[in-house]
Image (spheres, grey):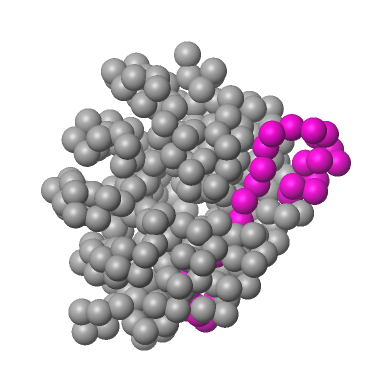
Amino acid sequence: MADSLMKGVIDMHVHTNPDLRTRRYDDFELCDAAVRVGARAIVIKTHLGYTANRAFLTNRYNRIVNGDNDFTMFGSVVLNRCVGGINPVAVENALKLGAKVVWLPTSSARNHLEKLGKPTDDCVDVVRDGAIVPELQEVFALIKEHDAVLGTGHISVSEIFTVVKAAREAGLRKVVVTHPEWWIVNMSMEDQVKIVREYDVLLERCYAQNKGVGAGNGYISNLPGNLETIQTVGYKNVLISTDGGQVENPAWEIAEEQYLQYLIEHGIPREHVRYMSHDLPAWLLGIEA
């Protein structure tokens, strides 16, 4: 059933090697897996900054090794300390290199560090005194100019509301709340409903989440909660992503198929599953599904 939906599937959030944390696939291996199942596109992500240059090389590899096919790898940029935080220059360069997603801080976010009980002296703030930091306005302008996607990263729920409001006021069309279910973000269902109702954003609901940051903590499935969100919020505001690549989780293509299969088996119409995993991410990337 779900295997047919793998044809043309798009995943906006996958981690690959090279990384400081060992991932299941490197960029080329993920590309090969995607081509085998007939995927349309994947966005690769690293907490270490850029992946647009890696996506370019992967696409070259794909044409040389796999020949003509419909798969495209896309890059992104994460605004952690390693790229200077909320750095418009880094964002502009990434977007000019073809990045499609700009993620706000993840491992450098104040909320992330606080949840782990770590010092916040070197954190990357997105909000101060109840308003977004000035540099973020420049970042928003660049995202708008390039029709790219804003992902909220690992910032807190209150910061998400502040950032999303400012992003909409700045004219951003493509705003995604990054894995709101993850315990670091921990956005309640009530707040997920509220932010969709007030700002018409997309909720990125991912395959699984770790029980605690670091190796050996294990992962738990997000699928029951994802199903509840789709039923509560509505499928048109839910983006299916795996946030895959961990060695503790199934290989990307297996996790993706399990996710789609779970939704179908629990009563979500195939056309709705297709919208969340094909049509919606295609719109975000500006490509044909």
Q: Quadrant of the C terminus?
A: top right
Q: Where is 185 relative to 280, above or below?
A: below
Describe residue 229's horizontal placement relative to residue 46 as left or right.
Answer: left
Q: Where is 49 relative to 5, above or below?
A: below
Describe residue 132's horizontal placement relative to residue 256 as left or right.
Answer: left
Give the mark count: 0
* Residue 120 visible in the shown view: no
Residue 224, position as x, y percentages in the image:
27, 31
Residue name at image x 65 percent, y 53 percent: 17
Residue 222, quarter of the rendered image: top left
Magenta segment boundaries in residue numbering: 58-87
Residue 166, position as x, y percentages in the image:
29, 70
Would residue 81 be counted in the magenta stretch? yes
Residue 86, quarter of the rendered image: bottom left
* Residue 175 visible in the shown view: yes
Residue name at image x 53 percent, y 37 percent: 10
Residue name at image x 37 percent, y 46 percent: 204
Residue 19, position as x, y percentages in the image:
61, 59
Would residue 183 be counted in the magenta stretch? no
- Of residue 250 and residue 86, the one placed in the foreground of this image is 86
